[in-house]
Amino acid sequence: MASDYIPPVADYAFLFGEAFGLDLVARGTGGAFSAEDATEIVAGAGEFAASVLAPLEVIGDREGARLEDGQVRMPDGFAEAYRAFVEAGWITAEAPESAGGDGLPGSIRAGLGEIWNGSNAAFALCWLLTAGQIHALDAIASEEIRETYLTKLVSGEWTGTMNLTEPEAGTDLGAIRTVGMPRADGSWGISGQKIFITWGDHDVAENIVHLVLARTPDAPAGAKGLSLFVVPKLLVGDDGTLGDRNAVTTVAIEHKLGIHGSPTCVLAYEDATGYLVGEVGSGLAGMFVMMNSARAGMGFQATGISDRAYQQAVEYAGGRLQGSVLDRPAGTPIAEHPDVRRLLLSMQSRIFAMRALGVYLGDLFDRADTDGTLALAEFLVPVLKGWATEDAIAITSDAIQVHGGMGYIEETGIAQHYRDARIMTIYEGTTAIQSNDLIGRKVVRDGGATAESLFVEMTATVAALREHDDAVATRMAERLERSIAAARAATASVVGFGQTRDAYGVSVPYLMLLGTLAGGWMHALAVAAVLGHDGADEADAARLRAADFYAAHHLPRVHMLAETVAAGEVV
Amino acid sequence: MASDYIPPVADYAFLFGEAFGLDLVARGTGGAFSAEDATEIVAGAGEFAASVLAPLEVIGDREGARLEDGQVRMPDGFAEAYRAFVEAGWITAEAPESAGGDGLPGSIRAGLGEIWNGSNAAFALCWLLTAGQIHALDAIASEEIRETYLTKLVSGEWTGTMNLTEPEAGTDLGAIRTVGMPRADGSWGISGQKIFITWGDHDVAENIVHLVLARTPDAPAGAKGLSLFVVPKLLVGDDGTLGDRNAVTTVAIEHKLGIHGSPTCVLAYEDATGYLVGEVGSGLAGMFVMMNSARAGMGFQATGISDRAYQQAVEYAGGRLQGSVLDRPAGTPIAEHPDVRRLLLSMQSRIFAMRALGVYLGDLFDRADTDGTLALAEFLVPVLKGWATEDAIAITSDAIQVHGGMGYIEETGIAQHYRDARIMTIYEGTTAIQSNDLIGRKVVRDGGATAESLFVEMTATVAALREHDDAVATRMAERLERSIAAARAATASVVGFGQTRDAYGVSVPYLMLLGTLAGGWMHALAVAAVLGHDGADEADAARLRAADFYAAHHLPRVHMLAETVAAGEVV
């Protein structure tokens, strides 16, 4: 049964307007946005998502995508939903103004990203890949490619894919064997096999633009020999009209644990016509623009899937009677059983933390050009991706637990979120890839300077909390301060290890430490914002409770992980 | 593809013979067993399981059980495997001598329990329920029922089920509505609907004995009004011959996330003929004998499923080449990538901990009659069940992670373990039910005395470790000692809370704390045993490494959880 989806508009209003005090007017390229405008955009997306996308989530899971005579057929309703999505302008909303889009601030796009994923994660992957390609082409493509392809992506007429993985080249992109051969007319002939291509084929839009990593003749070995090509599913004439099928074949689609509504394709390129994007040999750099966008997007996906599961758990626990509830009147539902309540608060407090960090990160990227926060933004991408997706597995598991035996029955629908969530720590780079990026390219390289700049900001929040005579603020300040100290010690350990197995042997624990800490900081900011109010309502009380819970149940993990990090690799 | 199953015989040999120095000769009721005998029995089970049960695990998942014209049909090969299982004597091996069984020590039965579950968890559930009913009937049934039913269960000719849950009575058994009406001939008419009945119907044995909780006329409300009945699928004549179908109908089987090879049935009783077991109104007490056996069995299932997933991850990681491995020669497989190695050690060290605690618990029950350890044994049942099953979810998730993108493809077969594992924290009592039992009936009731007796034993191990001049022993002693101190503080918190929401709001964190600590203690015992050797081989080195890893990566969780426990319920 399809569960309802309730867009988390109030949280975004709080984050935009209060918690971060975002100066959104200055952020977007597409005009001036107030916090109220921003909330209204998110609310509009929520309304669309709840009515159009959410009801298809279960259908996507049950029917799944099918491969018929070389063409992927999407589940019932997906094509209509995609058209409505495009017509409502939600693809264009993602694009920068320079590409003909709305130029929305990154913080708002974080909210949209969560909402597409929360309502229908399988569908949202089409948006995510298309959006990522829009940002990549906008950054590096020639005028010709912008005109022919980028405009069609921004209008939503065509969709985009990301073609990296091959059977022997997953994490190690340097092993890619697909080749691009130059042709006399300036185009390239692309040949090879790509696997795990999300939305690699479908029938919801008239054309698909594949962004393909391939090796050119005489290119150096490894990742430096890779170039980037756009390869359309249907060839495009000089006048922009669609022609014959290009030599790209969908060989198979995968039978997966989850996200059945997202077709995962094996694509065979046999001298398919492609066009170079950027310079020969700079393929990886171009792909990283798309990848950074997709990795941040995974944070939004983790938030969205987690929140959908949480909402369903809340609904079940609020309606189910079972046993008498300690210290509560007869007829109290299981939501008030101490351990069910613990599970629900555990989920809720983690979801708020990742949602807030997503908005913060989106805003950081907007500010990067003006206030030099790019290093911090790039530092936080792997933290958000790695931590939020790992936590999402735990959250969706908790949602099953709240349902008891009913949680294990597929018809209940809660298991889908658990199955869907399990891919997130793998695709767009496994958690280890995120943590290696974090440690190798960031922490060790700058001697912990960026991490320290983050700790300084967090410490300022501790000081702000100390100005309030409030029990929650006092507890939070004490716990956050101790956690920052543990994180500093762990950072010093990692920097001391340098580029060694000791560092990489504890890189995931270190990443999880930072994510957990950043989540606590988000709650601390929320506490400070709430206590800045005159008076307090039920929503404020709920924010304080969630923060207090996070500080007591999740934040102490920082100390556990710090002890692990200090040990280095166990040999 | 069915993965091979390698029975963990070496670990059991180590546990039986060295780590615990078990005086097995004195334990079983069925004769004298040396550690060598015990290992041989486990090895025999392993051989059977690897060749007969393991190949059917994937078939069970893909085909699943089907309901056809009111009769459950099991997947191909299950009936033959069950016959072979019975003929090899593995059902009889579970039974006490008083019931005509082999009277094996509990420590050996822990090993067998793991092996049935590791090779084929869905199949093992049939064994688990039958074994549980054997122990329950042996403890409380009349001579007549022993003769008619128990003998057939022990011989393996019939199988057993456990009928508790109803749509409105899951965790709250007091809400059970199924009724038993006395008849003139001494039998009872049973009417009602039971759900989630594992192996509630099948075609692998000629009859099924349902052990049913039901309410008698004029019985008091709640759990005290429940009585226990045996209700056969086929009626049994006075001479023991099988007659007509009893009035028990399989209404439906569930479509579940996992364990597809185990039929989960909805059973309708319509004045079905049943026979009272024990006294009227003592149903719950009788069912608890079965439940305790089944809960300990969940510890073995958690170990088995986790180890199967681990074995498959080891095989994949040892054969997969991807990227160059830091500080290792070219051609080193991904198993040596620092984070893959971390995942594998994380899994391995947790599995050893739960395996060892299962053996320890089995032995405790054997000793209970002679040395008064029953309180400790009953204390550890919910700890093992709750902690091992929760950890099994994390371990099977790690096994997917090791596979990267291939882990998400169902054909790889690793996702099955993850899906199968997810039920274990729910059935036989959710983790919250285990932790409420632990806190409410044990820790708070005896003022922490049993917990303290455990801490005293652990502290003796710390002292034993201190006698060795060894880096691993030194680190383990220091970490274990600190963890014991944290556990004592947490226990004092819980005892101080008493029977309040503060205690029940942190009961699961407290249970996980004790399980994690007990796991560390098991490793500490292993370290002491290994260092007691003259010389050390590769197996010894691996045990030290696993212990050192557990102490650095898992044991610190005790401190995290102690901070959470101290906070009580967050209001």
Image (cartoon, coloured by chain):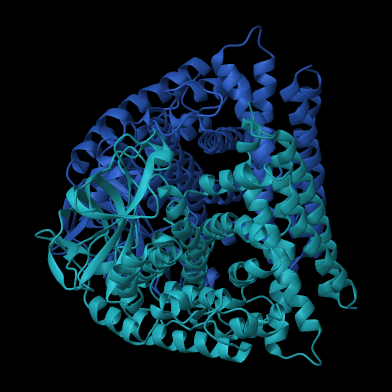
Chain colours: A cyan, B blue
From what the image shows, is residue A367 above or below residue B301?
below
Residue extending farthest to the left is: A69
From what the image shows, is residue B158 above or below residue B364?
below
From what the image shows, is residue A213 above or below residue B284?
above
Q: Which of A311 and A236 lies nearest the eye of the viewer?
A: A236
Left or right of A423 on screen, residue A519: right
Residue A179 in sight in this render: yes
Residue extending farthest to the top is: B534
Residue A317 location in percent, x, y?
A: 52, 77
Q: Which of A33 and A466 lies nearest the eye of the viewer?
A: A33
Image quadrant occupied by the C terminus of chain B: bottom right
Left or right of B533 on screen, residue A481: right
From what the image shows, is residue B176 above or below residue A421?
below
Left or right of B191 on screen, residue B433: right
Which of the 4 image quarters holds residue B472?
Answer: top right
Which of the 4 image quarters holds residue B547?
Answer: top right
Instruction: Tell me what residue is drawn at x 34 percent, y 84 percent.
Output: A52
Residue A489 location in percent, x, y?
A: 79, 45
Residue B369 in sight in this render: no
Q: Which of A5 and A333 lies nearest the eye of the viewer?
A: A5
Q: Which of A228 and B7 lies nearest the eye of the viewer?
A: A228
Image quadrant occupied by the N terminus of chain B: top left
Tag count in the figure? 0
Left or right of A33 on screen, residue A220: left
Instruction: Tell me what residue is drawn at x 75 percent, y 68 percent.
Output: B502
Residue A72 location in percent, x, y?
A: 18, 63
Which of the 4 image quarters holds residue A218?
Answer: top left
Residue A104 location in percent, x, y?
A: 52, 80
